[in-house]
């Protein structure tokens, strides 16, 4: 029998790419999502996957899903991720991202599910830590309530794992996901650069505004560690089979920093197109460089 893996927030960008990778690797993904940031119609390659419209903060509803399955592991993608919105509505972010996490851990405990993988972020690293960021680099001084939800989520999971010696927790700190077998379909104006570039290419937007060209980097634009979402998805497989209980932290990046201008050039070469852009002011909260 195939092992069933619960993906909370599995209808979203990284979750749906991971569901596809799990199918390809012989697992049975099961998706729980409230569709607050995704479509109820999934990519056709996920046809046949069991999907529940459930909010992970709803303990009774989540528990009813666990009653129907025998989950080998849970991957927690569910969360809100718009950095600027989190600054305006911090309680929504803490309530959803941390409330949902705690409810998920409680329901797992009640159903004796002891394997957990969590979507964390490079945003937990202290911007003052030296580059490249390694798993032991300092964390904290997050630049938004969103970032703090990841920081506190990690703390909660580490404390829970310490109190439950049979529990296996893997915290995956993603750097900047781009591309993927299933492309991101953001609602409204994209917050992240890659879907924005794609919308310029598709003619939905006139041009990209490059946020700042006076950073202390090789061409003045910010450096990030962009990683293909299919590669991110693949890196969720090994933690499902970790033998030894405990808590593990892993960076999910390429280890190579790319400037905004280099990213635009790469996109133009790969897609044989020209992406019009203009330099604009720096975006509040951006740091010059971030790579692992
Ligand atoms: P996404 O918004 O596409 O997917 C998240 C999914 O969670 C959405 O389908 C949304 O509807 C669902 N969701 C949100 N709150 C929920 C709730 N209470 N109950 C049930 N479902 C809920 O985002 P993504 O890019 O796929 O990110 C997945 C995870 O990875 C998130 O936790 C995000 O913070 C984290 N992450 C993302 C990035 C990135 O750049 N995309 C980087 C680092 C970390
Ligand atoms: C952002 C979040 C981070 C989150 C990540 C994934 C901030 C400060 N950080 O990372 O917490 O984990 O998204 O959701 O918001 N850029 C432009 N023009 C644009 C859009 C972006 O020049 O229209 C630049 C940015 O200045 C940055 C780079 O592109 O240098 C990448 O931006 P983005 O895709 O938003 O990701 P991050 O800011 O790295």
Image (tube, rainbow, N blue to C red):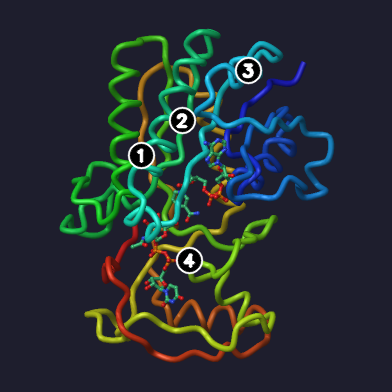
- Circle 1 residues within 10 Å: few <14, some 14–19, many ≥20: many
Of helix, strand and loop, which one carries label 1? helix
- Residue 192 percent location from the top left of the image: 48, 66
Left or right: where 6 falls relative to 264: right
Q: CA distance from mark 2 to mark 3?
A: 18 Å
Which residue is under mark 3? 71
- Residue 61 percent location from the top left of the image: 61, 20
- Circle 3 residues within 10 Å: few <14, some 14–19, many ≥20: many
Q: CA distance from mark 3 to mark 1?
A: 27 Å
Q: Nearer the viewer, mark 3 or mark 1?
A: 1
The mark tally for this picture is 4
Nearer to the camera, 115 or 254: 115
- Position of the C terminus by quadrant: bottom left
User: Which of the two labelled residues, at mark 1 and mark 4, occupies the earlier sequence position?
Assistant: 1
Which residue is under mark 2? 100
Q: Quadrant of residue 188?
A: bottom right
Which residue is under mark 4? 191
Q: CA distance from mark 4 to mark 2?
A: 23 Å
Above or below residue 10? Residue 230 is: below
- Residue 117 percent location from the top left of the image: 48, 31
Q: CA distance from mark 4 to mark 3?
A: 34 Å
User: Which of the two labelled residues, at mark 4 and mark 2, occupies the earlier sequence position?
Assistant: 2
User: Which of the two labelled residues, at mark 3 and mark 1, occupies the earlier sequence position?
Assistant: 3
**Contact check, label 4 and label 3, Cβ < 8 Å:** no
Q: Tell me the tag on residue 145.
A: none
Q: Tell me what residue is drawn at x 54 percent, y 70 percent.
A: 189
- Determine whether the beta carbon of the residue marked 3 sits less than 8 angstroms from the nearest atom of ligand 1: no
Q: CA distance from mark 1 to mark 4?
A: 20 Å
Which residue is under mark 1? 94
- Circle 4 residues within 10 Å: few <14, some 14–19, many ≥20: some
Nearer to the camera, 89 or 195: 89
User: Which of the two labelled residues, at mark 4 and mark 3, occupies the earlier sequence position?
Assistant: 3
């Amino acid at each position: 029998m195939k092992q069933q893996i619960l993906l909370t927030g599995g209808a979203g960008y990284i979750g749906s790419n991971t569901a596809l990778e799990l199918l390809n690797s012989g697992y049975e993904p099961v998706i729980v999502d409230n569709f607050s940031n995704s479509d109820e119609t999934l990519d056709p390659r996920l046809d046949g996957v069991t999907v529940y419209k459930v909010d992970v903060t709803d303990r009774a509803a989540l528990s009813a899903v666990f009653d129907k399955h025998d989950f080998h592991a849970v991957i927690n993608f569910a969360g809100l991720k718009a950095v600027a919105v989190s600054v305006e509505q911090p309680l929504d972010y803490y309530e959803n991202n941390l409330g949902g996490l705690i409810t998920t851990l409680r329901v797992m405990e009640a159903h004796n599910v002891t394997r957990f993988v969590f979507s964390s972020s490079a945003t937990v690293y202290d911007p003052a830590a030296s580059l490249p960021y390694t798993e032991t680099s300092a964390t904290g001084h997050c630049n938004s309530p969103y970032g703090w939800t990841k920081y506190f989520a990690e703390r909660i999971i580490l404390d829970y794992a310490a109190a439950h010696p049979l529990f296996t927790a893997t915290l995956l700190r993603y750097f900047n996901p781009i591309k993927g077998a299933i492309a991101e379909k953001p609602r409204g104006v994209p917050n992240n650069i890659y879907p924005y570039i794609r919308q310029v290419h598709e003619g939905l937007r006139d041009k990209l505004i490059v946020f700042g060209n006076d950073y202390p980097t090789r061409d003045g634009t910010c450096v990030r560690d962009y990683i293909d979402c299919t590669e991110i998805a693949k890196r969720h497989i090994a933690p499902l089979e970790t033998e030894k209980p405990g808590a593990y932290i892993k960076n999910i990046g390429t280890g190579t920093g790319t400037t905004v201008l280099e990213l635009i050039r790469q996109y133009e070469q790969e897609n044989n197109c020209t992406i019009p852009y203009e330099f604009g002011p720096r975006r509040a909260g951006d740091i010059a460089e971030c790579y692992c």
